Image (spheres, coloured by chain):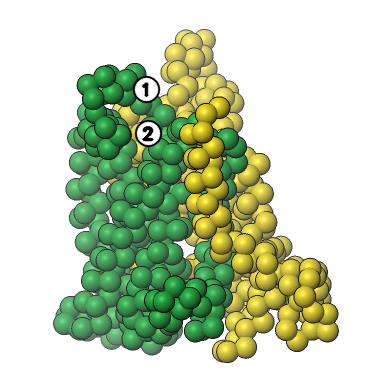
Amino acid sequence: MGAGPWLRFVLMLAIVAITLVPIGVVLFLAFTPSAASASSGGFTMENFSSVFATSDVLLWLQNSLLVTLGTVFVSVAVAAPAGYVLSRGRSRAVSGYSLMLFVFQSLPVITSVIPLFILFAKIGLVDSLLGLTIVYVASSMAVATWMMAAYMDSIPISLEEAAWIDGASMFRGFVQIVLRNSLPGVLSTAIFTFLVAWNDYLVAIVFLRSAVAFTLPVGIQSFFQQNTTDWGSVMAIAVVMLIPPVAVFVLLNKYFSVGGIGGSLAGQ
Amino acid sequence: MFLLIAPSVALLLLIHGFPLLDAFRQSLHDGTLINTGSFVGIQNYTDNLTSEVFWKAASFTLVFTVVGVFGSWAVGLGLALLLRTRIPARGVFKVLLLLPWVVPIVVSSTAINWLVATSSSPIPQLFETLGLGQPLFLADPFWARILVCVFKVWISFPFMMMMSSAALASVDNSVYEAARVDGATGWQQLRWVTLPIVARSTYISWILMTIFCVNDFPTIFLLTGGGPIDATNSLVVLAYRLVFQNQQVGEGVSVAFIMTSVLVVISTLLYRQIRKAAH
């Protein structure tokens, strides 16, 4: 290799270092003893032990995981068949559906959140993880469907046609031919919906009112007090929040592709 | 075929369609979260459209969106181009650069908050050392706006980088050789070869990012809460504050609804444009 690649390597190293400062800050503060504690300087786990001992962080973690996994499963189950229709369908109804997805995606979540809050309050879905899951599934629906459609576009239709000639129904063609070959598309959609549900803040602060139902983004807020924020504890929870999405992304990122959504949005 | 999209359509109508109608009804009343209140006609709309706070929020939403879309696009495209070249450990860099988009905003905004909160925080100290004064990022309207916009670019550039990388992957390298033979400089190649080839995908990524920016809530709310003195108040943050902090549901929902109607019109037009450009 000449000097060029290594020069770019150094440049890239500098860019990445600056970019990751906020994440570095979280890790640094989480493992640094707080000013009030007896031990000073150096590395410590005491922020974690004190947060786990004195707060409901484990409960919030469990709530976040339940809501997120629920969202992932339901989203894939709903978006996979819908994506198939978007990928294969050429009728006016399908175009109408596609336009509806785009328009709903472009609306501010806050518009639907307020009436839904009032509706959900009547049927007991406020302060409920189920209610939260339903909203997350709906708000990630458009992108999830485009992602599934984008992947299915790459599966030749001739495979299903062969199955139809053999007497398979449309539904069987979808499940046995297309869905079985769509694992990367399913994973991509799963990763995206995982991030939507795990990282959401707005829907959670509106719908979750009591501490037993808190997910992590709401729970962490209870550590912020005027002027006396306990940074060590806050950052310890931040690390707990950081690990699942980063782990999912680092392990599965080769399956993750947003590039295709442009194509399926444009109907190609 | 109908059965395959039925669950999706049902969910969309229940969670987006119905609330939309209900939101419209609420926007014509002066209710709270508990009471419907009485019918006030278009009072909430005229109140908003004649209020200074509303227009201030609208103009900041515009600034925030323009900076968010083009800032994250420029950074994302630049990095995508850089990552196309031969660099040791390129794969690792690629993953690390996506982290700002992956990390929850609640987490990253907490870190930013720690970095800038007081005049003795690290970033103001760094500014001091560089002889740039000691800006109070959360208390000074000018700096608060810059902070929020830079934070949005930081969160969003990975998405644009992924979109750009996907589009660039389809560019055949032989077109560059042809351009080089014709004596095109690096900048000319970018302007007259690369950008036209990825134009359609660029256009789509701008549209998606515009939607993400206009509708963004946590980026602003978690850093500044819309302050200081409403300097970083966007329309979504304004709607949230009216409803949940001031209990003025009708007024807040009508802000959201004004945005919604503008967005429906714009998104329908843009959608047609995308479809046209594609065929």
**Secondary structure of residue under mark 2:** helix
The residue shown at (27%, 42%) is B203
Query: Residue B125, position in %: x, y?
Result: 51, 78
Which image quarter holds the C terminus of chain B?
A: top left
For label 2, the residue is B167
Which image quarter holds the N terminus of chain B?
A: top left
**Foreground pick, B24 / B107:** B107
**Secondary structure of residue under mark 1:** loop
Query: Residue B37, position in %: x, y?
Result: 32, 86
Query: Residue B231, position in %: x, y?
Result: 32, 79
Kind of residue at badge 1: Asn
The residue shown at (59%, 31%) is A183
- Does A100 sit left or right of A240 as displayed? left
**Foreground pick, A222 / A5:** A5
Dot 1 or dot 2, earlier in sequence: 2
Identify whether B245 is placed above or below A150: below
- Does A20 sit left or right of B219 as displayed? right
**Foreground pick, A172 / B92:** B92
The residue shown at (52%, 29%) is A2
The colour one sees for chain A in the rendered image is: yellow
Kind of residue at badge 2: Ala
- Quadrant in the picture for residue A86: top left
Residue B50: assigned label: none
Q: How would you rate the neighbour count of disc 1 (Cα within 10 Å): few for under 14, some for 14-19, many for 20 or more?
A: few
For label 1, the residue is B173
The colour one sees for chain B in the rendered image is: green
Alpha carbon separation for disc pair 1 and 2? 13 Å
Chain letter of the residue beneath label 2 in the structure image: B
